[in-house]
Amino acid sequence: MLTHIKLENFKIWRSTGPVRLAPLTLLLGTNSSGKSSLIQSLLLMRQTVKGNDAGLDLNLGNADAGDTVTMGQFSDLLCRHAMASYDTPATRVGIEFGWMPPGGEASDTTMFSARYRKGLAGSAELDYLRLGQDGKGFTVLRRKPGVYRLQLGNRIRHVGQSADFRPERSFAFSAATLNKLGPLAEDIRPVGPALLDELSRIIYLGPVRQLARRDYVWSGRMPAHIGDDGGRAVDVLIASGVAQQTKQPKTGVAEDTGRIFRETEHWLRELEVAEGLQVRALGRSARYELLVKHRGAVVNLKDVGVGVSQVIPVVVAALFAKPGHIVIVEEPESHLHPLAQAKLAELLAKVSAERRVQFIVETHSEHLFRRLQTLIARQVVQPEQAALYFVERDGQAAKLRELKLDDFGRLTNWPDKFFGDVLGETREQARLMFDRQAAKKAES
């Protein structure tokens, strides 16, 4: 589970300060305020460490290569109104986050803290990296182009400085370097793979999800992922639905693959967008269609409201996640009616508690937020299990405000004009009603 994130001079953020991440983390705020930048920093590191180009310290993205985020050049990444902090000069970008195993203690937290500077041809070059638990892991510091000084754990003396001590993709040393370090390498050998494992647990679902298709080609196997646009969520349902309908392990997965299909049906009913689902093969081909049971009829997914095709990837992402996974979703409420938006909070809370899945959600939904308040009041969710932030502009930079909830789900520091002025609207309606009633009496 990710425990915190901190950004310095990253896009619109001069500094976020340490931002606590909980099992349920909600990012709220106005448009273009900086919410998505918080998410992009994690996705940027994920595509960097999972990449195959050892020469890239930071993979700023290439749309043609299918990268999740495309950040342009280093100058686009660096905050235009950057400021120097205690440990990050105004010409550097800082990215820091921590993680620990589910159910772990604070002492189990592993830290990734890196600074980047402008490199050749607009690239990002690693300037500093600290990776590991307290007193463990390693630190590298750029001394001159391509040359880094290496320090292990909490040792006072550094190992030395060399071009060999430049971590590949900002997280791991080459096999040749580890061999040269000999016994010293044992302290740092597991740290890089641990970071790769943690970031590989991220399931990301963007705000623009793939629209429904009339039919789908299914490979006969359970997909390994659902795609950043949810494009393979229906493939997951087909795999799970076939297993559910035939009661045979045709999907090549030993676990109960029918679970996802059954639970998706359940949550679609809870959201009141569908009464059930059905998978139907088209002849003897590899093509299948997903049918939706709605108001007594059974229709193709393509022929129901857009809200259904947009929420299916959200539900599937939550149910597809394994214990310890991190699901990041932007605007899960897209095209949903208010009750369904509220019910999404119940889905997130239940899956997080029962399957130990972490959710980081960027949303504009007042209904989702208020239902989470109610779940805290019901003691379904404990206040410490949720972290809620309001992001707003402070001049040219972004500003983060943590929203404090008490044990009854009440917000103790309500932001100005948060979700609009509901009481003001009610007062205005009441005033206009009385004014019109008074006018009618005067006319009579």
Image: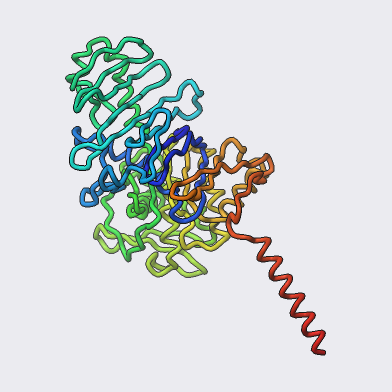
Q: Which residue is drawn at 29% across and 29% down?
A: 127
Relative side of 94 to 343, left or right: left
Front residue of this view, candidates 290 and 410: 410
Q: x and y percent of residue 194 in the render?
A: 34, 27
Quarter of the image where one finds residue 155:
top left
**Does residue 20 show up?**
yes
The N terminus lies in which quarter of the figure?
top left
Taking the spot 37% from the left edge, 67% from the top edge, the residue there is 302
Residue 65's x, y, as percent? 21, 48
Residue 259: tell me if it is visible. Answer: no
440 horizontally vs 272: left or right: right
Quadrant, the C terminus: bottom right
Please give the name of the residue rendered at 71% of the width and 66% of the height, measured from the top-left corner. Answer: 427
The picture quadrant where one finds residue 133 is: top left
**Residue 198 percent location from the top left of the image:** 37, 32
Question: Which residue extends farthest bottom?
Answer: 444
Rendered image quadrant of residue 287: bottom left
**Front residue of this view, candidates 120 and 403:** 120
Q: Where is residue 114 in the image (x, y as percent from the top left)?
A: 34, 30
